[in-house]
Image (cartoon, coloured by chain):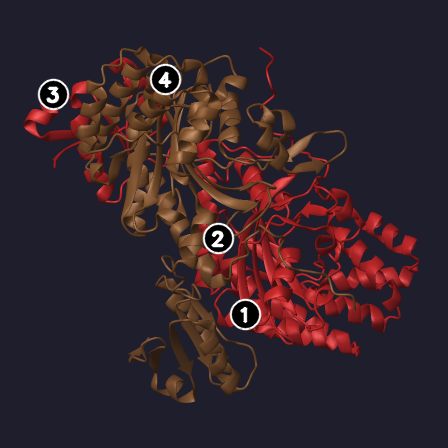
Chain colours: A brown, B red
Amino acid sequence: MQQINTKPLSGFLQLSPSDQLEFDRIRQVILEEHLKAGFSPVDVPLIYRNEVLLAKAGGETEKQIYELKRGDHNLALRFDLTVPLAAYIAENQSELSFPFKVSQINKVYRGERSQFARLREFYQCDADVVGRETLSVSYDAEVINLVNSIYKRLGFGEFTIRISNRKLLTGFLNSVGLGEKLSDVMAAVDRAEKISSDEFKGLLSAIGLDQSQLQRISDFISIEGSNDEIIGTLEGLGVEDSSYKEGLVELKEVLSILRQMGSESNIKIDLMIVRGLDYYTGTVFETILVDHKEVGSIASGGRYDNLVSKYSNEKFPGVGASIGLSRLFVVLKEKGIVSSKRKSPTDILIIPFSADQLEYCYGLAQKIRQSGKNVDILSEDMSFKRKMKYADKSGIENLIVVGENEIQTGELKQKNMFTGEESIFSL
Amino acid sequence: MQQINTKPLSGFLQLSPSDQLEFDRIRQVILEEHLKAGFSPVDVPLIYRNEVLLAKAGGETEKQIYELKRGDHNLALRFDLTVPLAAYIAENQSELSFPFKVSQINKVYRGERSQFARLREFYQCDADVVGRETLSVSYDAEVINLVNSIYKRLGFGEFTIRISNRKLLTGFLNSVGLGEKLSDVMAAVDRAEKISSDEFKGLLSAIGLDQSQLQRISDFISIEGSNDEIIGTLEGLGVEDSSYKEGLVELKEVLSILRQMGSESNIKIDLMIVRGLDYYTGTVFETILVDHKEVGSIASGGRYDNLVSKYSNEKFPGVGASIGLSRLFVVLKEKGIVSSKRKSPTDILIIPFSADQLEYCYGLAQKIRQSGKNVDILSEDMSFKRKMKYADKSGIENLIVVGENEIQTGELKQKNMFTGEESIFSL
């Protein structure tokens, strides 16, 4: 027989039942924290007209998009959850209350060259607040606070949320007469951490900056100290540009709210953070694990002011936080930070010694299930030895073997397969 | 500005936040019942090589499949969860313990002509048990019992799970010398309920059956009575065909186990049930709402003996139950059987009277969240009148307005927006 290759395509995760359990647990924690903070779940379609998906996309995205063959329609798969959200808001603006807080935990598709932990199908966990015409900067603090709550609860180790505001660098560049080089400088700053200081300066001179200009930018993005010290330094620079001043006010307010929320300890101002994407306009942030910086950002996002602009004449400013869960899971598992402790969601496995005890076992299972436990019965007709082998391999924590004796005495023995502990109970 | 059409494609549901909450609640109930019965969640990829998806598919499926344009690979989207499961089993057989019980709650894609409640993107909720070489018929009873638990808990009204066994009709046809017309007769029986008795007989004569043959088949599938009476009638027919006898033994055993599980009251033997799909080989069932038969089957499935055969030389018999959740939701909502009671997952909305109370509100929200409640703060700077309008439109059940007075006295007033009830509390 010709064998068909059933291996998942490269870049497509297929988790084992054990990993799936741990993955689902993490996903559930994220969802619960979204809900606790007042975000409403939205489940968007997978397939859109190309023109909807590509309205905002750059050349790189266009190359990565999965297009469908389907008559003469130009259809494709979503590559993020932000574009579908924008279409959703444009379509439903009259029914929604703004500010509208949205939770989206869903898969997205990017046909890029796949490499370790670079996936083509992956979960994004997005929380966005979208306003109509205006959106208070307090919501910037809210999404950052949400990231803080999520990682405090997940317990993957010490983490830092590094925040900045794009208006600061924009204004600073304006003030030194480099306003027209903004997007090139932003791109260089975005790479600054991944390259050496000399390489960084090389990038800036390639853009056309002279020695003194590139030194000033280097100095600016390297401002250090406590959050209050950095704010003090920024205030003392005497930059009069209006964008700069606005950015500083916003950054101070975000920080002050995070202090009021009791989550400032994990927050650190860092002027190197600009985020690659063009659509961010104010607050930007990234999150790193202090002991595993090499993992890269485990949650990032920021403020965007013109998201729905391609679909609507009204203005819908927004701010969001996104976690790339699938990549995070793979990387943290590889490092042993995430481990799949349970092999099965089943709490108790009931094994009838022989087929004669099956009927009793069905009733027993139904009763234990009613108490909220997950219960399985091994009703397949196999030797007792094979049944015990199954119990072992299944990884189910508790085992109840039911034989004639148990039914007669009504005394059942539950054995914890992890600890070896046994306990007797009766119904 | 040229407006882009952001309407979802036809056949793609985009639920409102309120409907989404109810949808998610139902989905969660189904998942919990799967887990309670010992099924493990598996989350399969969306995209496969065409040859994997089409290994088992007939002509109709091939026309409905969404294919991708992607270099010279032939890729497509899953159109059900059974084929991906078969690939998964073939791929991971050495790591899994059999019988393997799988829960899959995921979207599938079929590019068929869309009409009301006929969707191109929809959730399937599948529970399957897969054995290696053998699989006891007791698992047929288990998946039927699972459907019973799910619908008892969901409370959509009185329902009946109609069960049969394909071997009975197969054997009966053999015994009257019509074995080679099996698949045509099955197809006719599958339609019998939707057409008149004359049309049904017309179908059978078109296949080439004479008057006496078609009468015998009509009589056979119309056998009525209690479950025990039908079994008695089937035993009394004196059919000696081995397939028939096997089917009868299996049906009796399934029924006996369902009785032991205490779920027989919703089960009804019905020989008209054959299920359209060719791969069912034994037990088959459908579920109907007694007061809304026109909805059609709300959960169906059966036994298949050769699912993984295209990918593996080993035999992996299985039995499954599937709920087409998206269509079910749309239809039951239209009938008022499902209603979206809550507009928001948020339990409490905190509104600061003015910006002066914001800081206090952040602390308050954090404290209430710690007690497990979902809490939102309206921190947007707007008039108090607009804030109250937001509170109204948001549909959040409880409201706490915080003014100067509340902060000074420490006495907070929580108002239930649905009942008008007010209660005073302090932190």
Write the residue at 60% across / 19% down. Answer: B4
Which residue is tagged 2? B30
Q: In this rendering, which labeled residue sits more in front, label 2 or label 3?
A: 3
Which residue is tagged 3? B404
Residue type marked 3: Glu
Are both tags, 1 and 3, on one chain?
Answer: yes
Are both tags, 2 and 3, on one chain?
Answer: yes
Residue type marked 1: Leu
Q: Nearer the viewer, residue A108 or B379?
A: A108
Are both tags, 1 and 4, on one chain?
Answer: no
Among numbered discs 1 and 3, the one appearing first in the sequence: 1
The answer to whether marks 2 and 4 mark residues whose Cβ atoms lie closer than 8 Å is no
For mark 1, name the chain: B
Q: Is residue B397 visible?
A: no
Which residue is tagged 4? A173
Query: Secondary structure beneath disc 4?
Result: helix
Residue type marked 4: Leu
Write the residue at 34% across / 43% down. Answer: A288
The answer to whether marks 1 and 3 mark residues whose Cβ atoms lie closer than 8 Å is no
- Quadrant for residue B122, please give it: top right
Q: CA distance from mark 3 to mark 4?
A: 43 Å
Q: In this rendering, which labeled residue sits more in front, label 1 or label 3?
A: 1
Query: Secondary structure beneath disc 1?
Result: loop
Label 1 crowd (10 A; few <14 / some 14-19 / many >=20): some
Looking at the picture, does residue B41 appear above or below residue B330?
below
Which residue is tagged 1? B96
Query: Secondary structure beneath disc 2?
Result: helix
Q: In this rendering, which labeled residue sits more in front, label 2 or label 1?
A: 1
Query: Secondary structure beneath disc 3?
Result: helix
Q: CA distance from mark 2 to mark 4?
A: 56 Å
Q: CA distance from mark 1 to mark 4?
A: 59 Å
